[in-house]
Amino acid sequence: MTRQTNKKTSFWKNVIKYRALLLMVLPGFIWFIFFFYIPVLANVVAFKDFHYSAGGFMESLKESPWVGLDNFKYLFASKDAWLITRNTIAYNVIFLLFNVFFAIAFAIIMSELRNKRTVKVYHTMSLLPYFLSWVVIEYFVSAFLNTDKGFINQLLVGSGADPIKWYSNPTWWPLILLFMSVWKGLGYNSIIYYASVKGISDTYYEAAMVDGASKWQQIRNITIPQLLPMMSILLIINIGNIFKSDFGLFYVIPKNSGPLYDVTSVLDTYVYNALTATGDIGMASAASLYQSVVGTSILLVTNAIVRRMDPDAALF
């Protein structure tokens, strides 16, 4: 009894001691509760044949019949289940590999520049796409890919070749989406690695230069090994998002074109189309819950594997 009393006293002493920090955290904590954790309870819709009624959401939830796993059965029985799962995983894995490679390469190149003003200019230019909305970027993409007046088709016609119907031909779209993903995320991702590279002690490089190591040998044996802890943490986070696609990239950039459905349809666009086209809220919720559960499971498994290999490199 005395021990429990001491624990309670110690707890409230810590609350009073760190009250300033707790007050700083409180707005974010409240925001997470209301906009992240409470909405999770609405996942019960995935197990109901949900239809809106005049009484509002709660009344609709009560009146909608319980169907158990039927929404998931319909989802996995359709041909779309394999398509959207394959596209989501394949695109995210490829995006992850290319984004990491180009971000590290760009960060190392920036770290080799001695003119700080030049580095700032390059970082600012590379960050600009990250802050642009996909809606704005779509206008630039359309200026290049428009069938009649697009810049690329104008060059093709001028050279005697036939124009390409970009929004009807799915052949080039995996490469277009890959390029857009790398282009938009390069600045943000490279700055994280750039900060890590600049944090590496110069004594390592000085010792390597004394031993006659080339620049590539320094990068391979010093820079990249020193970046591995940061790479591991970012890799775990990104793998956890492997079932979460960039909605703007896959919906806005291809203009939700029907002929491109097989190469641009992912889980996020499927959920949106299910809501807007069919109005099937239950199946759309089932797809979202499936996405969340699998993504969380992959995150936990990946973190467990990394923690077993190197506890210091694990996320938690």
Image (cartoon, rainbow, N blue to C red):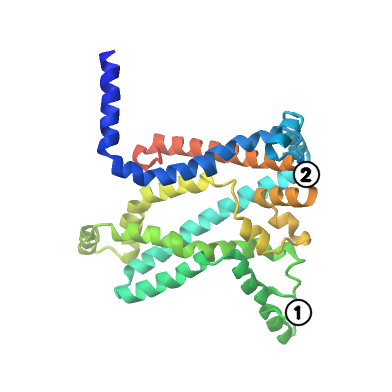
Please name the residue that numbered disc 1 is placed on: 148
In whole angstroms, how far apart are the C-alphas of marks 1 and 2? 34 Å
Compared to residue 3, the image places residue 99 above or below, namely below
Position of the N terminus by quadrant? top left
Please name the residue that numbered disc 2 is placed on: 79
- Going by the numbered disc 2, the residue's amino acid type is Lys
Compared to residue 66, the image places residue 81 above or below, namely below
Compared to residue 10, the image places residue 174 above or below, namely below
Q: Position of residue 307 (x, y in %)?
A: 40, 36
Q: Nearer the viewer, residue 290 or 233?
A: 290
* Horizontal side of residue 304 vs 273, given as left or right: left
Residue beneath the point at 45% across and 65% down? 187
How many C-alpha atoms fall within 10 Å of the one at disc 2: few (<14), some, or many (≥20)? few
Residue beneath the point at 74% across and 56% down? 261
Residue beneath the point at 33% across and 56% down? 196
Q: Position of residue 61 (x, y in %)?
A: 71, 34
* Horizontal side of residue 190 vs 181, given as left or right: left
Q: Nearer the viewer, residue 113 or 281?
A: 281
Q: Position of residue 97 (x, y in %)?
A: 51, 54
Q: Secondary structure at mark 1?
A: loop
Q: Quadrant of residue 25?
A: top left
